[in-house]
C-alpha cells in the first residue's frame, strides 16, 4: 500500500509492488485519484459560489434595485400620459393599454415591485390575489393533464381534492403528486406516454437486453462489495466495542461518517477510512473481480460528483459560462469579468430607463408614439423565446 496524503486525507491507491500493474489496477488508481480531485473541486465550488454571491450582492443587486424602482416611476408616468390622452387613436390606445398592463405584470410578478396593485386591478380588471389564484389553479390542472398523459390517472376524488379542497389538504396532495411524477413511476409509465402521442417506443435488441442484464448484475455485485467494505469497517470500528470514553466518542463520529458514505455509495471515503483506520487490506492481493467492481463504482461516483457540481452552479443562478469553471483555479478572475460586464449592462439599462422617464414626463408625443410601437412589438407581438419554458416542460 502507498499512502498519499492531500489535505490529510488518505488516498487508497494500489502500490507498484508488482513488476507491473494490470490495466484494471492502473484504472483503479486513476479513478481513485479522479474522485479525490472531484471531491476537492466540489468543496472549492462551494467557496466559489459564495464568492459569486457576495460579488453579485455588492455590485449587481443595488443597480438592479434602482432599475426596478425607476421602472415603477416609468409606469406611473405612462399611466399619466395615457389618462391625458396624448395618443388619441383607438388602436394606439389599445396597444398602449396592453403595454402598460404587461409592464405592470412584469414588475409585480417577476421583479416583485410594490405599490402597483391598484394600477394592476384597474388595467387587468381583477386583483393580484385573484390572478395568483387563477395561476395556481392552472398549474394544478396542468399537473392533472400530465399525470393522465403519463398513465398515472387520478381518481375523481383526488382531482376534486386538488382543485377545490382545503388549502392545506390540496398542498399536501400537490407535493405528493409532484414527487410521484419524479420517481421510478415515470420510467414505469413511459410507454403510455409514447402511445398518447401516437408513437411506439423502440424495442430493445437482444444484444441491448443482454448488455442491460449484465450491467444490472454488475451493479448488484458492486452493491454487495460496497456493503462488504461497510460491514468490515463497522465491525472493526463500532463505538460500542470501545471501553475508552474519549476513543468511543471519536469512533461514534467515525461510524456516522461511515454510515453516511455507505448511504451515498461513496466508495472513495469508505476505502480511505479503511486504509487510515485499519490498514489491514492489501490491494496488491485484490481479486480481479473486486478491482473491476471498485472501478465501476468509482466511475459512477465520479459522474455523480460532476453532476452535483453542475447542479450546484445552476441552483446558485450562475451564468452558463461560469458553471463550467466551477472548481477551477481561475474561477474568481473569470467571475469578476462576467460580473463587471453585467454591471455595465445593467447600468446602461438604468440610464435608458431614466431617459425614457424624462421623455415620457416631458409629454413628447413623437417619442411616446415610438416608445409604444417599439415596445409593443418587442415585448408583446414578437417576444424573445423563453427557453425556461422548455426546462419546465421537461422537468
Image (cartoon, rainbow, N blue to C red):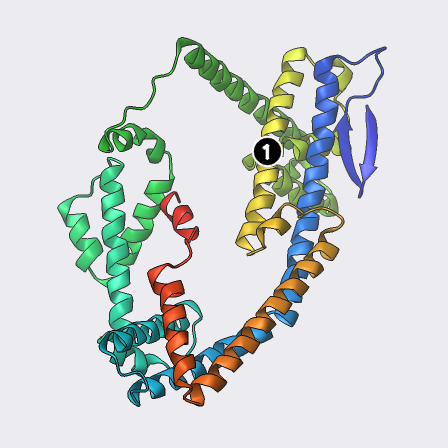
Q: On the rendered structure, is 153 left or right of 266? A: left
- Eyeballing the image, is 206 above or below 121? above
**Picture quadrant of residue 336:** bottom right
Name the residue rendered at 64%, 56% in the picture: 49
Question: Callout 1: 10 Å neighbours few (<14), some, many (20+)?
Answer: some
Q: Is residue 91 positioned above or below 362 on the image?
A: above
Q: Is residue 312 above or below residue 375?
A: above
Residue 84, picture quadrant: bottom left
Residue at 54% in and 78% down = 66
Q: Point out the image quarter for the C terminus.
A: top left
Where is residue 9 drawn, in percent x and y?
77, 39
> Between 217 and 58, which is closer to the camera in this rendering?
58
Percent position (x, y) of residue 125?
22, 76
The spot of residue 247 in percent (x, y) is 73, 43
Residue topped by disc 1: 303
Please report the residue visible at 57 percent of the width from the left and 77 percent of the height from the top.
351
Q: Secondary structure at mark 1?
A: helix
Q: In this view of the protein, which residue sits in the foreground, 323 or 311?
A: 323
Does residue 81 appear to the left or right of 327 in the view shown? left
Q: Position of residue 188 (x, y in %)?
A: 32, 29
Residue 331 visible in the picture: yes
Residue at image position (22%, 40%) is 148
Q: How many marks?
A: 1
| Left or right placement of residue 221 versus residue 82 in this view | right
Q: Quadrant of the N terminus?
A: top right
Pick the residue in front: 366 or 8: 366
Left or right of 32? Residue 289 is left
Amino acid at each position: 500500500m502507498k499512502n498519499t496524503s492531500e489535505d490529510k486525507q488518505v488516498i487508497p491507491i494500489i502500490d507498484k509492488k508488482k513488476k507491473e500493474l494490470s490495466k484494471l489496477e492502473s484504472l483503479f488508481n486513476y479513478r481513485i485519484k479522479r474522485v479525490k480531485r472531484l471531491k476537492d473541486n466540489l468543496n472549492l465550488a462551494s467557496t466559489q459560489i459564495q464568492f459569486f454571491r457576495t460579488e453579485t450582492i455588492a455590485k449587481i443587486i443595488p443597480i438592479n434595485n434602482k432599475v426596478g424602482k425607476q421602472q415603477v416611476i416609468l409606469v406611473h408616468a405612462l399611466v399619466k400620459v395615457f389618462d391625458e390622452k396624448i395618443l388619441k387613436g383607438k388602436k394606439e390606445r389599445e396597444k398602449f393599454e396592453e403595454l402598460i398592463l404587461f409592464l405592470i405584470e412584469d414588475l409585480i410578478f417577476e421583479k416583485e415591485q410594490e405599490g402597483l396593485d391598484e394600477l394592476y386591478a384597474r388595467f387587468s380588471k381583477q386583483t393580484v390575489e385573484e390572478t395568483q389564484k387563477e395561476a395556481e389553479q392552472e398549474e394544478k390542472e396542468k399537473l392533472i393533464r400530465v399525470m393522465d398523459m403519463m398513465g398515472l390517472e387520478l381518481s375523481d376524488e383526488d382531482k376534486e381534492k386538488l382543485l377545490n379542497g382545503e388549502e392545506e389538504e390540496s398542498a399536501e396532495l400537490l407535493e405528493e403528486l409532484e414527487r410521484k411524477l419524479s420517481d421510478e413511476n415515470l420510467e414505469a409509465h413511459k410507454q403510455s406516454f409514447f402511445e398518447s402521442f401516437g408513437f411506439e417506443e423502440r424495442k430493445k435488441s437482444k444484444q441491448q437486453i443482454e448488455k442491460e442484464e449484465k450491467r444490472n448484475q454488475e451493479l448488484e455485485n458492486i452493491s454487495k462489495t460496497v456493503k462488504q467494505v461497510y460491514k468490515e469497517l463497522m465491525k472493526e470500528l463500532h463505538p460500542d466495542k470501545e471501553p475508552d470514553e474519549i476513543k468511543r466518542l471519536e469512533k461514534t463520529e467515525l461510524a456516522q461518517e461511515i454510515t453516511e458514505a455507505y448511504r451515498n455509495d461513496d466508495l472513495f471515503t469508505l476505502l480511505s477510512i479503511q486504509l487510515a483506520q485499519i490498514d489491514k487490506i492489501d490491494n496488491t492481493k485484490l481479486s480481479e473481480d473486486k478491482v473491476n467492481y471498485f472501478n465501476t463504482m468509482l466511475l459512477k461516483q465520479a459522474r455523480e460528483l460532476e453532476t452535483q457540481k453542475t447542479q450546484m452552479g445552476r441552483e446558485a443562478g450562475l451564468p452558463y459560462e461560469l458553471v463550467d469553471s466551477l472548481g477551477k483555479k481561475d474561477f474568481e478572475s473569470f467571475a469578476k469579468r462576467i460580473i463587471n460586464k453585467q454591471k455595465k449592462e445593467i447600468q446602461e439599462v438604468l440610464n435608458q430607463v431614466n431617459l425614457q422617464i424624462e421623455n415620457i414626463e416631458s409629454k413628447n408625443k413623437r417619442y411616446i408614439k415610438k416608445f409604444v410601437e417599439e415596445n409593443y412589438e418587442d415585448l408583446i407581438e414578437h417576444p424573445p423565446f423563453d427557453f425556461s419554458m422548455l426546462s419546465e416542460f421537461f422537468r
